[in-house]
Image (cartoon, rainbow, N blue to C red):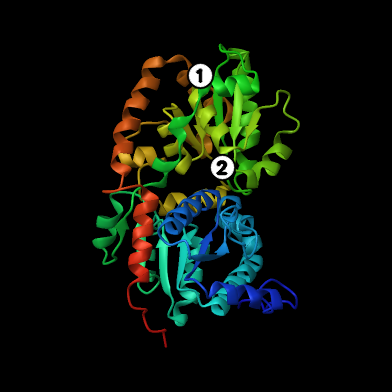
Amino acid sequence: MTPPLEPGSAGALLTASRAEELSRHRHGRVIWILAGEASGDVIGARLMQALHARDPSLVFAGVGGGRMEALGLRSLFPMSDLAVMGLVEVLPRIRFLSQRLLEAVKDIELRRPDLVLTIDSPGFTLRLLRRIEYMGIRRLHYVAPQVWAWREKRVAEFPGLWDRLLCLLPFEPEWFAQRGIEARFVGHPVLQSGVRQGDARRFRLRHNIPENAPILILMPGSRRSEVPRLLPIFQKMVKILRVRFPNLCPVIPIAPIIAPTVRHLIRKWPDQPYVVTDIHDKHDAFAAAHCALTKSGTSTLELAMGGVPMAVTYRVNPVTAGFARRLIKVPYVAMINLLAGREVVPEMLQENCTPQKLADVVTLLLTDAAAAEKQRTAFQQILETLAPPVGTPADAAAAEVFDLLASPVAPPAS
């Protein structure tokens, strides 16, 4: 049972300021948009820009991070409240997340937007879409749930959840069609990331890094629940690597929302890594990097765009890992490997995610030029498959949004 809203909590009362805001919103079409983590915030911001380019009168409400807020979104509550994953990690926060879900439902009910657009984060967003089904508001979900990887049976829950589903990966529409679900490929947002505009020399000059110092990118994730699992392992790995490469420079590019957590966790490292939060500085770091160690996810595609040889690593709670191993149906966790259908980059997961094993795989990446170049060649072939038929991924997604806005509104569920 969802807990009731406490007096004075966000969404509990339609305050005078909220009423005034709702009144202003009615002067243009309202899109209620929600992103639940850093990658969704980036996708949402690019989509907002593409939508505004076609219709400057659009008004946005919902939940997002710094990038979406910079474009005028007043987030209903901090996006970081939703950035949690893993069965064991989620359990202590169920009551809190239920409260946030209720606040989002109430806000949509009050605003009655022209469209509700959810981005990724299926644990929260799909529950939200189901809860608002009775309102008869157009619903679009951007970034198809990766049920092709695990928990395929969840497809049976999808009919009625949305009016349109947008996919990032070229094989997804056919996979969903075979199971009776329409989905549309709009290209992968990583193609708009700007990674290829990075400047290696600028990065070294800005941070006073010698030309002969090898740069190692460390990407421990974008959620508070996963960063504490990887950073202590990375610290021990770096200690091993410094014996082999005394002038090694570790760099941690991280979303601003998680930067305080990272800085707290690395405060006692003997040699402080460079923490990068600016997006342009991150791209410069990629251009300067010799190799990278990253969690699975979109970061693998970003690094591929930058031509950075990498290994993928991850460690979760053993209970979560046990469940995942029984449910995962694909042979790889790294998106690069899944798209290639083979192991292009090494995967160092769970029991292989140890300081010594990670140090050994990084050593290989730093010393074997042929292996690094083989990865780069594969990256280019894979990235070509991620482009939409026309325009940018954000433009393609925006076209789908406007097409849905022009369609009749489905009657509210009884």
Farthest residue, direction top: 212
Q: Nearer the viewer, mark 1 or mark 2?
A: 2
Q: Nearer the viewer, residue 105 or 130?
A: 105
Q: Residues within 10 Å of mark 1 (few under 14, many from 20)?
A: some
Residue 92 image position (x, y, % from top left): 66, 61
Position of residue 163 relative to residue 80, above or below, is below
> Residue 219 at x, y = what percent?
55, 36
Residue 363: mark in rendering: 1
- Marks 1 and 2, the one that precedes in the sequence: 2
Name the residue that disc number 2 marks. Answer: 221
Q: Where is the C terminus found, in terms of image quarters?
A: bottom left
Dividing the picture into quarters, in which one does residue 260 lie?
top right
Residue 149 in sight in this render: no
Task: Kindly report the distance in space between the C-alpha atoms of the residues bearing marks 1 and 2.
Answer: 22 Å
Q: Position of residue 191 (x, y in %)?
A: 39, 41
Instruction: Name the amino acid type tagged 1.
Output: Thr
In this view of the protein, which residue sits in the foreground, 311 or 118?
118
Q: Nearer the viewer, residue 128 or 229?
A: 128
Please state which amino acid type lies under the numbered disc 2: Gly
Is residue 81 found left or right of 124 in the rendered image?
right
Q: Position of residue 108 (x, y in %)?
A: 54, 74
SS at mark 1 in the image: helix
Residue in the picture at 34% in, 42% down: 338
Answer with the quarter of the image where residue 5 lies: bottom right
- Residue at screen point 51% across, 22% down: 200
Q: Quick check: 279 left or right of 158?
A: right
